[in-house]
Image: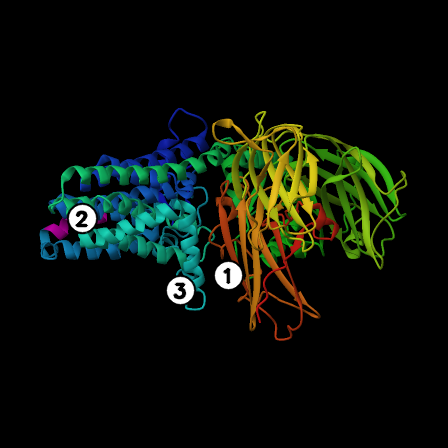
Amino acid sequence: APTHGIAHPPGYPLYTLLGWLFTLLPMGDAAYRVNFMSAVFAALALALVVRTVRTLTGSTSAGLVAAVMLGGAPTFWAQATTANIRSLVALLTVALLGALLRYERTWAPRDLALVAFVFGLGMTHHGSLAFLALPAALFLLVTGPRRLADARLMAQAVGAFAASLLVLLYLPVRGAMDAPLNPGGLTTVEGFLRHVLARGFEGDMFYFANPAVLPDRLAVLVEILRLQFGWLLLGAALVAGLWLAWQQPRRGLLLAGTFLVNAFVAITYRAPQTVEYLMPAYVALALMLGHGFIEPQVALRNSMLPLRPLRFFQSVLLASLMFLALQNAWSNLPSYRVLSRDWSTRQYGEMLLWAAPANATILANWHYATPLWYLQRVEGLRPDVRVSYVAPRGTEPIGQTWRQRTDEAVAAGPTIVTNRVNNFAAAYQLEPLAGAYRIVAGSETRFLADKEFFPANVLFGDRLRLAGYRVDLAGLQSGEIARVTLFWQPDSVEQDYAVFVHLVDRAGVVWGQADRHHTRAEWKATPLLIDYLAIHRRPHIPPGRYTLVAGVYFWSGSGLERLPSSAGGDSVRLGEVEVGLLAESPVVQHPLHQLFEGGLTLTGIDYDTSLPDRLRVYLHWESATGEAVRLFADNSLVAEGKLPGAPFATTAYDLPAVPEQLELEVMAAPVLGPWRMPVGPRIGLPALAPGERFLVFGGEMALVRADWRRDGADLEADLEFLALQPLTRDYTVSVQVEGAGWRAQDDGSSNLDGTPALGAIPTLKWVRGMRVRDRHRLRLPQSASGSMRVTVTVYDAFTLDPLPVLDEGLVKLGQGNSVELKGTQGN
């Protein structure tokens, strides 16, 4: 917008022009001003929702309920606070529906012209709004079919529609002036239509509209709507829509039709932003809720019932709906407070551009290419660096595309990549650089004199020399304690080795771990191998000072063995780090508010049954001051410990079996009941659900349910994740299945690796407390027989770094990066 550029298909000329106007405001930088534009569009959309419902029903309260329902939905809130085209989609959708409903009441030619003009603007903004022509046309036909035969009336409407399309002239005009990001060809009819109609995405339209996958996609649709509004509010909106269709069939046809048409188009479209494409459906649901629950009162007033009870019933109903809508918004507020202070994108872009060598090429995915372009073209940062977007090439595997583009860039000069793909290892060494990777040819000799590091010069097993290391404690993402870079010089390596970094306390107990496995070929491919490892915070780590140590291990016939260190022992000390206090009470599956004498509060409990011979119990506390805690099963003491002194704390206890009833006692702190009166020394804890889990990945999310079953040649794995914080990174969930001599492969019909919820709910859209169901359906090879091993891995979609499993018991079993599922097996 600030450079009068040309956005990717379909071009978004209306958004770009309006964005340019907002960049003229004297506030913040250009990015802030365009973000602010989204907030303005969202606020206008909510204001129009209130006005539309109030005009139709006479109730401002009903309009406010609809607006709070829509505004509190996490996707609407997210799009309202970032530079994104969806807020304008919402505004144009509610403007179109409001104009249609106004025409129903007035039959005024200017109102039909307004319908045509708004619809045209919507089409120029985003082509998906063109599908709303179906419910709009049906609504106009049933509203007044004879009036649509009026030539003068239709001429005015067609003229208004044509006027709205003039905004598209921006594209060929700026294309002729070679505007930034100009794709070329916009001055020709073919090139113009290709860009405006987004023909490059034609193969994605209705991709999932086939009987084989549509049922799963419809289940995902229900899941998305639940995540946006919750079951009660969603159910109320659907019931209101049904009542509206009965009482006001035309309006019910318009609103329900808008919801159904957009929902079908969005859920069958192949794109990892399904939650965003459903924006018109969210608008329609909000209007259905606001309008539908007022209609019963109109019907009842026409009956012989007294008016006062009707008003009381209406007030109670609206108050209940407002409570549900505010509760949904309130639950999302902590996440957006955190996100409003998130500068990670700017920090990443600035650090990477400043760290890039002169005249380097940065090959980036779309996620990072756009902020890098902004910093260069709007703020003038490092114009000598070439930022190139690596776009998919039809059906070519994306890893192959990255490899080919990298080969071309390396031949021209220094190259940096934001993504790491598996086939890089054969030809290149990847040197961590400001969150990305600098490509180093395998034959290139690297000199440590060029590096900033602490020298170590420690030899492990006469094979691997740790030449130096670097510990980064600044600019870490949530959940990380430290990032460690290790510089290795291999010598005569004849087998695979893994390196590790441990976080240990004074007693030597391991409280954090990161591993990286390297094959013999990787060790022999380069004179200097660089590892980049992140240590994540375990849920129950006490605050205090810890030591970082590094070492090397390998798998022998007798199990896991470490290489001895020339410095003595089997590891080398890297330094100390301070683990701080928790800033807030964590997300839990079983929330509680149990008070104890002295101010101690038990805020929640989680159970994990990931290990078959162990039950892990997490207890979450507030205002802990060092009290002793004991757990009882069937009146027998099964675990005990002491709470750390902290405002918020989590403690973990391992039990050898799953008890029928678990009780908790805090020594010298009786349980408080109503009016804060002591009621006894112990409390019963919530019952454990079958198969309940709480397996934390990297402090970002927890796996809370996992079942798999075999059905003939297919295997279905049903997972459920709980977001422990608002996520700002794009993670991939991988399900792998293998048996004796066979392994499931991705042949196009299997989704072994992918964005959660069949690609519909990226982790970038998750907020604190969100529970996301993720189904993987895998086609097994014909040779699959006997027992099988099913594992789950969560990794960064760009760097391929796995989110570590933060359970020391599983780490000891070699499941530090991937966890094996003990699920339900079918036939």
Residue 572, image x, y percentages: 83, 38
Q: Magenta stretch containing residue 155, yes or no?
A: yes
Residue 209, image x, y percentages: 40, 64
- Residue nearest the observer in this picture, 59 or 445: 59
Task: Please give the residue where the numbered disc 3 appears in the rendered image.
Answer: 209
**Side (left or right) of 426 relative to 338:** right
Name the mark on residue 394. 1
User: Which-is-in-front pick, marks 3 and 2?
Assistant: 3
- Residue nearest the observer in this picture, 57 or 353: 57
The kind of residue tagged 3 is Ala
Give the CA distance from mark 1 to mark 3.
Answer: 20 Å
Q: Residue furthest bottom?
A: 782
Tell me the crowding category of disc 1: few under 14, some 14 to 19, or many 20 or more residues within 10 angstroms, Cα based: few
Main secondary structure found in the magenta portion = helix
Name the mark on residue 159. 2
The kind of residue tagged 1 is Gly
First to last magenta residue range = 153-163
Residue 211 visible in this rendered orientation of the protein: yes
